[in-house]
Image: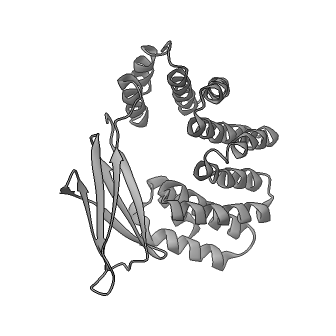
Amino acid sequence: VAASRVLTQNVSGVGDSATVQVLFDGRPTPSEAIAVGGGLRVRAVVEHAPVRVTLEYADGPERPEGEWSLDVRPSSDPEALVRAEGLRDAGKFDAALSALATIRQHPDLGVRAKVLGLVGRIALAQGAHKEAIADLELSIRMKRVAGAVFGEMSDRYALSSIWKNEGDYAAAREVLLGAQALAPSYPAGAMRSRYYEGTVSKATADLRRALSLFEGAALDFDRLGVESLWFSVTLARAETLHKLGRDRDARTLVEQLARRIPQTPHCTRAEAVELI
């Protein structure tokens, strides 16, 4: 791979004292194990592919050892697209757009759609909301034709957030309906819809519905190991509980965030502290 990937795997039925080892092509590699409900969540960074990842674990003499393996393949995306994603993540928007310019007319429709989706996100980061909306809408249509289900869902969630921030809540919900329609093809991706629906409900002061959606999303994100969204939805739950006058429950959630503070994005950490 041209860019690193964080590989996450849940190991159920083991205690937090279990021994865990991750191997890349049979060689031990650094990893992190975090206790979660009913087991451990193990993370390792994959810098290069192809590679065979093996996870070995044991939880004392009374329980059998276990093993899990996965073959990680190289990304099929053009190098320019992978490079542009890294530049975008680093805030180097002009350099990212220059890299994308070389593949704007790529023969593969799926690649052109990914380029457009990334261009839309860069426009959003630069405050060009109208351009971002136009790019993402076209990217969604192209990804539907190309059968890129995950990419279409991701674009829909980004577009829904823009419409919500623009105050067009009907448009935000309409975009999310399209993501829900894709659920049979990618159930794990569709689970995120509850979080984004919750943000729209929260913005329209439908707080009880928002809280219900956030609670369901939090369970999904914790189970799937989607840490960044777990932090976001937990903060949203605390804010919603505070608005509902349930300050004790809100403080309990903030304490949960505090226990995971070393892994918390800086902006989420700051917002959580404001609620304490």
**What is the x, y in percent for residue 130?**
67, 25
Asked whether the viewer can see residue 92, the reply is no
| Residue under the point 39% across and 24% down | 78
Q: Is residue 20 left or right of residue 153?
A: left
**What is the x, y in percent for residue 115?**
51, 24
**What is the x, y in percent for residue 215?**
66, 66
Q: Is residue 17 left or right of residue 212?
A: left
Number of marks: 0
* Residue 25 vertical placement versus 224 (above, below): above
**What is the x, y in percent for residue 15?**
38, 80
- Name the residue nearer the viewer: 82 or 39: 39
* Residue 107 vertical placement versus 132 (above, below): above
The residue at the far left in this view is: 27
- Name the residue nearer the viewer: 66 or 46: 66
The residue at the far front in this view is: 64
* Residue 233 vertical placement versus 246 (above, below): above
Q: Is residue 128 left or right of residue 105?
A: right
| Residue under the point 69% across and 69% down | 241
Looking at the figure, which quarter contains the C terminus? bottom right
- Name the residue nearer the viewer: 157 or 231: 157
| Residue under the point 76% across and 54% down | 201
- Name the residue nearer the viewer: 201 or 176: 176
The residue at the far bottom in this view is: 62
| Residue under the point 60% across and 59% down | 233
